Amino acid sequence: MKPDHFRAVGRRIVFWRHGRTDWNAAGRFQGQTDIPLNEEGQRQAVAAARRLASLEPSGIVASDLERARTTADALASLTGLPVAVDSGLRETNAGVWQGHTFDVIRAMDPEGLHRWEEGDVHLPAGGAETRLDVAARVHRAVDRALAGVPADGTLVVVSHGGAIRVGLAHLLGLPHGLWGALSGLSNCSWSILEERRPHDDGTPRWRLGEHNAGTLPVPVTVEEG
């Protein structure tokens, strides 16, 4: 009998988007601008951390941007785990688009924003990073963090909406044309990857167990933050 490549056999990765910020509320493309959580975002982080603590995580790693680190700290305070910080988990560097609403970006760069919204993985956002760039560095950051996770452990990765979505697509091995099939995450919601039997070369194989989970559905108004 052939092995069941679809059965979960080992580790889990919980990708957790940070809580809400004032720029999220205003519909601004945050990118790598270091915007803190607002009061609502802090409440979201505490509430979500209570749920995620029940998964008994083995490790926590976060983007070095304040909104992600503060969100991660809410879980660390419940679990006693330290928070590792990795700049590879930052949001997309969106260059000149950062800090602007999408209406302003559309006026500045209508063709570029159209290509971005259509899911072009090769377009440098605001002249800076492409989705392929972001996906590759998120994947590398996750691999670094997984090195310290036991064979049956759970890693919580605290990052950003756009970075998580393309990181998930990359880890799942989705063709570029299907990356847009994954929705973004609401603030403080999470997605879970479950480890399956490895590829023939020994590299991990993942399946999507949950996506944009955590509460009743909340519309995703601005993903890139």
Image (cartoon, rainbow, N blue to C red):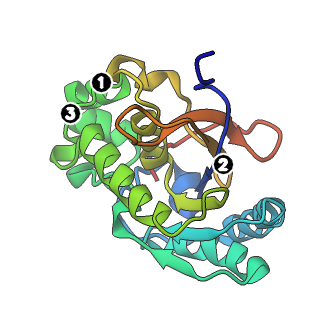
Give the residue type that dot 1 points to: His
Mark 3 = which residue? 123
Mark 2 = which residue? 190
Query: Can you tell which of label 3 and label 1 is closer to the viewer?
Result: 3
Q: Are marks 3 and 2 in contact (CB under 8 Å)?
A: no
Residue 184 appears left or right of 79 = left
Instruction: Decide which of 128, 79 is in the foreground and name it.
Output: 79
Q: Earlier in the sequence, mark 3 or mark 2?
A: 3
Q: Taking 75 as reference, is 136 above or below it?
A: above
Q: Taking 150 as reference, is 197 above or below it?
A: above
**In terms of image quadrants, where is residue 40?**
bottom right
**In terms of image quadrants, where is residue 49?**
bottom right
* Mark number, residue 114: 1
Real-space Cα separation, disc 3 to disc 2, in angstroms:
26 Å
Q: Residue at x 66, y 68 (%)?
A: 58
Looking at the image, how many numbered discs can be counted on the residues?
3
